[in-house]
Image (cartoon, grey):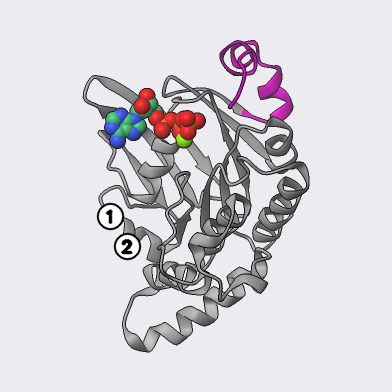
Amino acid sequence: MSARLEVRHATRRFAGLVAVSDVSFTLAPGEILGLIGPNGAGKTTLISLISGTLAPSEGEVLFEGKSITYQPAFRRARLGIGRTFQIMRPFPGLSVLDNVAVGALFGHGGGQAQLAKAREQARSSLEFVGLGKFIDQRADELGGPGRKRLELAKALAMQPKVLLCDEVMAGLNHVEIDEVIDVIRKVRDQGISILVIEHVIKAIKSLSDRLLVLHHGEKIADGTSDDVLANPTVVQAYLGKKRT
Ligand SMILES: Nc1ncnc2c1ncn2[C@@H]1O[C@H](COP(=O)(O)OP(=O)(O)OP(=O)(O)O)[C@@H](O)[C@H]1O
Ligand SMILES: [Mg+2]
């Protein structure tokens, strides 16, 4: 099957630092790819290159075979690339519902006429992630686990074909992690391709079809989780260190 998303030789520099260095990979329709690596390895930078919140210094990003490398983030969202943010910033005065409706509008164009439709989409995304009971609450009153689900709902409200998740399980307990894993599996069952950044190895191993490992911006492994987690370079670079 042809790739839904392809990253070719992506590099991103910040002044003297190479945050992402010559990274290439593909993501198939309905595939879950786990992206792991130590703190500062370049994981968030890589998904920002895909979602368009950062431009690559070199390399290309292709969506369904066409280059989107120079498209702005909102256009990529409308094409079908949704992401969550590691640093969550809900719009403080807005309800949970309207925070997600903003996501839906970003993904599908604005205008008053679209607002009712966006709220409808937001409602269904919030039900989907288990926040259905909280839609009228102010978003800034949600606790950490609720905010993680809110991020997921916002991205899903864009009705993406590719979902990029940046540590949506960080800070959650085991029960909450299992619930989020179930939500992500249900997303995949709709044929959506998913890239998941996560430090919780047990969770990412059970969820992912494949794992990709970054270290100092470079791809050091890409394959089945069993192969990747047994790879001595990965063990040395990543698993030997304490995670946050
Ligand atoms: N906007 C920026 N300006 C300068 N340096 C940056 C910027 N964004 C990221 N970096 C640097 O790029 C490197 C990769 O950062 P990135 O956030 O992508 O890592 P990460 O793998 O997501 O880490 P973590 O697991 O801690 O979230 C780090 O050294 C970071 O300090
Ligand atoms: Mg990060």
Which quadrant contains ligand 1? top left
Residue 28, x across and y down, in percent: 57, 48
- Quadrant hosting residue 209: top right
The residue positioned 39% from the left and 66% from the top of the image is: 78
The magenta segment is: 223-244
Q: Main secondary structure of the magenta part?
A: helix
Front one among 123 and 20: 123
Q: Position of residue 15 (x, y in %)?
A: 21, 24
* Mark 2 neighbour density, 10 Å: few (under 14) some (14–19) many (20 or more): some
Judging from the image, what secondary structure is the residue with disc 1 in? Answer: loop
- The residue singled out by tag 1 in the image is 71
- The front one of 20 and 136 is 136
The amino acid at mark 1 is Gln
The circle on residue 75 is 2
69 or 202, nearer to the observer? 202
Determine the CA span between mark 1 and mark 2.
6 Å
Q: Which residue is drawn at 32% across and 52% down?
A: 68
Q: How crowded is mark 1: few (under 14 residues within 10 Å), some or many (20 or more)?
A: some
Callout 2 amino acid: Arg
| Number of residue marks | 2
Q: Decide whether residue 225 is among the magenta residues.
A: yes
- Which of the 4 image quadrants contains residue 134? bottom right
